[in-house]
Image: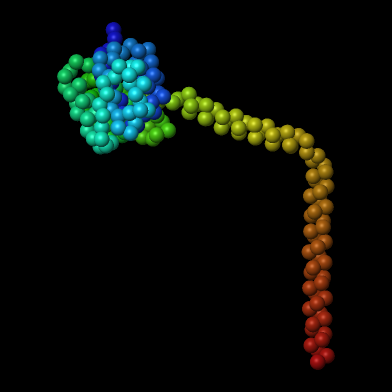
Amino acid sequence: MAKDLALFIDCDRIDAAFMSVIFDYLQNHGYNICIKKAYVGKDNVDIWYNQLERQYCNVILGNTQANINMKISVDVAKALYQGRYHAIAIASNYKEFGVLASSIRMHGVEALCFYQASKGNEIFLKRAYNIIYDLEPTQSKTHVGSEIESAHDTLEAFESALEGLDMKLLEANLSNDTTTSKQSRSQKVAQDTKAKKSTKSSTTKK
């Protein structure tokens, strides 16, 4: 049986490119989206327009981020106390919405969060919501994979260098360097001793 869900999207904290990912997730996991509200600042309307129109979202404009935060909080509270929804989803990295998530869970309603890990607050979001979904996991895995691949390439290059290294020649060079170093030190000591004797002899004659 599909779960009735209310969706609230904080457009100023989520990239427009991930809009379709949110709806694909909800549809694939058996949620019936009853409310679709998107909150966007006037400066970002052009960026979001096509995405919001395609998903038939109810668009709420905000003058400031604080104004948008307040509108989202009020609408989430209204949806919660209506008692009509099995789940409430908030698409935002804003950690203060964790207070809303706690209230949602206390009323026995499932709290979901869509976020981007690269924008921070992941640890806090994990504690506040029942379910959190990183909208950019593929990118993160690719980044980690590239680091592992890079490290692997470096190790292979180092191993190849070791294989091509003539250990006997290296030992001979080290031995020669050590012998030369010892000879240099011996010569320096002899020179210092000779200089001291010369200085002492000159002083005695005077």
- Which quarter of the image is occupied by the C terminus? bottom right
Instruction: Report whether 177 appears left or right of 19.
Output: right
Residue 45 or residue 136, whichever sits in front: 45
**Residue 186, image x, y percentages:** 81, 65
Q: Quick check: can you spot residue 102? A: no
Q: Is residue 62 left or right of residue 93?
A: left
- Which residue lies most toward the top here? 1
Residue in the image at 28% along x and 36% along y: 65
Q: In the image, what residue occupies the spot 38% across and 15% down?
A: 24
Q: Quadrant of residue 35?
A: top left
Q: Quadrant of the N terminus?
A: top left
Residue 148 drawn at (x, y percent): 57, 30
Q: Nearer the viewer, residue 76 or 53?
A: 53
Residue at 60%, 33% (x, y): give it: 151
Q: Is residue 158 above or below residue 17?
A: below
Query: Residue 135's x, y, as percent?
Result: 41, 24
The image quadrant of residue 61 is top left
